[in-house]
Image (cartoon, rainbow, N blue to C red):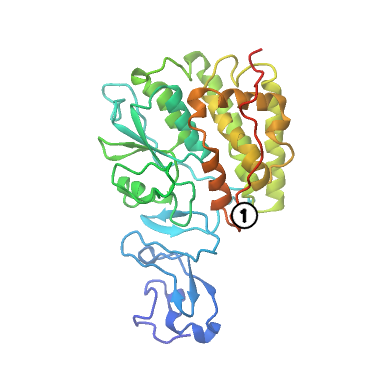
Amino acid sequence: MCDAADTEHMFCKCVQRTCKTCVQCLPRFTGGNNVFIWMDDGCVNHLVYAVIWNSNDVLHQHRQNYKTIRLREDTEVMGGLFREGQWITAKEWEHDKDNSFKRQVSSFRDTVTDSTDAKFQPEDGRYHLYVSYACPWAHRTLIVRELMGLEESISISVVHPYMGDDGWSFDTSDSEVIPDPIIEAEFLRSIYVEAKSDYTGRVTVPVLWDRKEHTIVNNESREIIRMMSKGFDRIARRERNLCPEHLEEQIDKAIDEIYEPINNGVYKCGFAGSQEAYNTAFKTLFDALDHWEDVLGKQRYVCGDTLTEADVCLFTTLLRFDPVYYVHFKCNKKAISDYKNLSGFLRELYQMPEIKKVCNMDHIKRHYYGSHPQLNPKGIVPLGPELHLDAPHGRDS
C-alpha cells in the first residue's frame, strides 16, 4: 500500500478507504496485470464505479463536469447512467432482491394538454421527439405519431442503433441516424443534463422535448402516446382515434396486462439474475402470450374491433420476438410465427403503411445483438430468420 496518502498520486482524497491505494504504485502489487479496481461511490465529486489498471495505461477519462469512466472495449458494459449529473458506465442492469430484472421508472412526467392554462400546449413545430428505431418503447411513439398524422407537427431525431458505454449517440456513420437540432448533441445524455443539470438515472428513449420551455416534457412512452392520441388531437392531420373515450378504461387495463408479462417480460427473461428468476419470467411470458392468442382468436384487435394504443403496445414486442427475443433473451418455448392469431395480428399491423415505414429491422437486430456483450460477447448479428411479414394476414374475416 502506498504511503502517499495526501499526494497527487491519489485518485480521490474524499473516500479514504479506497483512495489510499496509489495507482502509480499498484503494479508492485499486481505484477502489472490488468485488474479491476472497484472504487467507493460515496463521493459525488470523484464518482467512480470501476476503472481498469494496465501497466501502460489507465483508461480513465477524468472530466470536471459530467465525468465519463471509459472501460476497455472488451469490458462488458450496459450503457450508462447519471448520478447527480455525473455520467458513469454500468456493468449490469439493476435487479430486484429476487434477481429479477428491474426497469427504471421514468423521471420526466409532464403532459401536453389542449388547455389555455396548460404549460405545455399542442403547437405545430414546438416539440421534438428523440427516438431509436430499435427500442420498442420509442417505436410506440413513432407509430402513433404516424397514425395520428403528426409528422409535420413533431420533428424527430433518431439515434444510432449501437448503445455502448456512452449511451445512445447521434453517430451519423449510419445514414439513418437523424442528428440533434436542439443543442447539436453528440450523445443523448447531453439532452438530459440540458434539461436537469443534476439528473440521476438512465438515459432512455423516447424523449419529448419542448423547444419553447427548453426542457424535457416526458420520457415515458405510454404517456407520450396518450398525449399524441388526445393532447395533440387538435393539430393531428389524420382523423383517427386511438383512445376512444368509451374504450379508455379497457385500453388502460389491456396495456397494463400486456406490459409486465410481455413488454417487460422478455427483458426479465433476457436479463434475469438467476435461473429461478428466469424460469418465473419465462412461464409468465408464455402464459400471457397464450392468453392473447386466445383473445385475438375471438376479436380482431386487443380491445375489440377498433385499433387502439393497446395494439401498438403489443405490436412492438411481437415484431422483435422472433428475430431477437426468441434467441437473444432465451424466450424460446414458441416463436410468434407458431401462434396463428398473434402472427396474423403482427402481419396486419406491420402491413399498415404508416406502421411499416417506421419499422427498421436492421436497427433492431444491430442494437440488441451488438449492445449486450454479456449476452452476445462477439456481437455477431444473425442473418435470419425469414419473417414473411408481408404474407397474407387473414384478419379480414
Q: Nearer the viewer, residue 217 or 352?
A: 352
Can residue 305 be seen here?
yes
Horizontal placement of 340 versus 51: left or right?
Answer: right
Residue positioned 49% across, 76% down in the render: 54
Residue 158, percent across and down? 41, 41
Quarter of the picture containing the C terminus is: top right
Using the rendered view, name the quadrant where residue 224 is placed. top left
Residue positioned 58% across, 30% down in the render: 315
- Give the amino acid type for the residue marked by disc 1 in the picture: Asn
Q: Is residue 5 placed above or below 322 in the rendered structure?
A: below
Residue positioned 40% across, 50% down in the render: 171
Q: Nearer the viewer, residue 29 or 368?
A: 368
Residue 72, percent across and down? 50, 66
Using the rendered view, name the quadrant where residue 128 is placed. top left
Can residue 102 be seen here?
no
Q: Is residue 290 placed above or below 165 in the rendered structure?
A: above
Q: Which residue is mark 1?
A: 376
Residue positioned 48% across, 39% down in the render: 133
Residue 19, percent across and down? 43, 76
Callout 1 crowding tier (Cα within 10 Å): few <14, some 14–19, many ≥20 = some
